[in-house]
Amino acid sequence: FLSGDNFTMKRLILTGLVFILSLLISNNAFAADTDVFTDTLKKIDNLACTQPEKLPGFYGQGLVIMEDDKRALLSNRVKDYRQMIVDFRDINCQIQRQILAGQVGSKVGYVLADEIISITSKSNDTDERQHSVCTYNFVKEGSNWKITHEHCSSLPDYGLNSDGDALY
């Protein structure tokens, strides 16, 4: 009787270990797959407040950008960033991004992200924050991934900590 229970216990433990290991492997595979998209977003982040004229190279044909319930044009975004750089002295842009979901296929993929954008400046004590949840759709053009759809919805700013935020 005990040997049968021992066998069942070992089988249960082995099944549990295999399950946990599969979760770890799939989670790492998810992170590795979506890294190409998060790396692209980081490059865009680094250019937005320094060289916004280079941003169009990261976006594909037929681009649609939605900010809340309004459509935005990339050309206007570039102009706005350029004007912000001119208007604000010692501008500092920081973006915190947590990838909540994502998928990579051979030609298309997406990421869903929780983002907090912080822009500070010494010229007039500017401290702007925008908290959003964003979806970025990517299409492979040649060997490069390009954003073809970006949709960000504003969220209440709970601060830079995740305490109390419904997405965490």
Image (tube, rainbow, N blue to C red):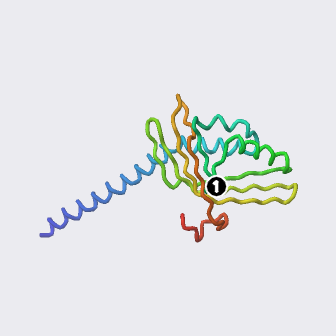
Q: Does dot 1 land on a helix, a strand or a loop?
A: strand
Q: Is residue 36 left or right of residue 90?
A: left
Identify which residue, 153 or 58, lies in the foreground: 153
Extreme residue in the left direction: 1
Identify which residue, 163 or 4, lies in the foreground: 163
Label 1 Cα neighbours within 10 Å, binned few <14 / some 14-19 / many ≥20: few
At label 1, which amino acid type do we have?
Answer: Gln
Identify which residue, 46 or 129, lies in the foreground: 129
Extreme residue in the top direction: 142
Q: Is residue 159 left or right of residue 25?
A: right
Identify which residue, 34 or 79, lies in the foreground: 79
Q: Is residue 48 above or below residue 142?
A: below
Q: Residue at x 70, y 36 (%)?
A: 54
Report x, y in % for residue 47: 71, 41
Q: Is residue 168 above or below residue 30?
A: below
Q: Quadrant of the N terminus?
A: bottom left
Q: Quadrant of the C terminus?
A: bottom right
Q: How many numbered circles does the render carry?
A: 1
Report x, y in % for residue 101: 48, 53
Q: Residue at x 44, y 46 (%)?
A: 29
The residue to which callout 1 is attached is: 96
Report x, y in % for residue 31: 49, 48
Q: Residue at x 73, y 37 (%)?
A: 53
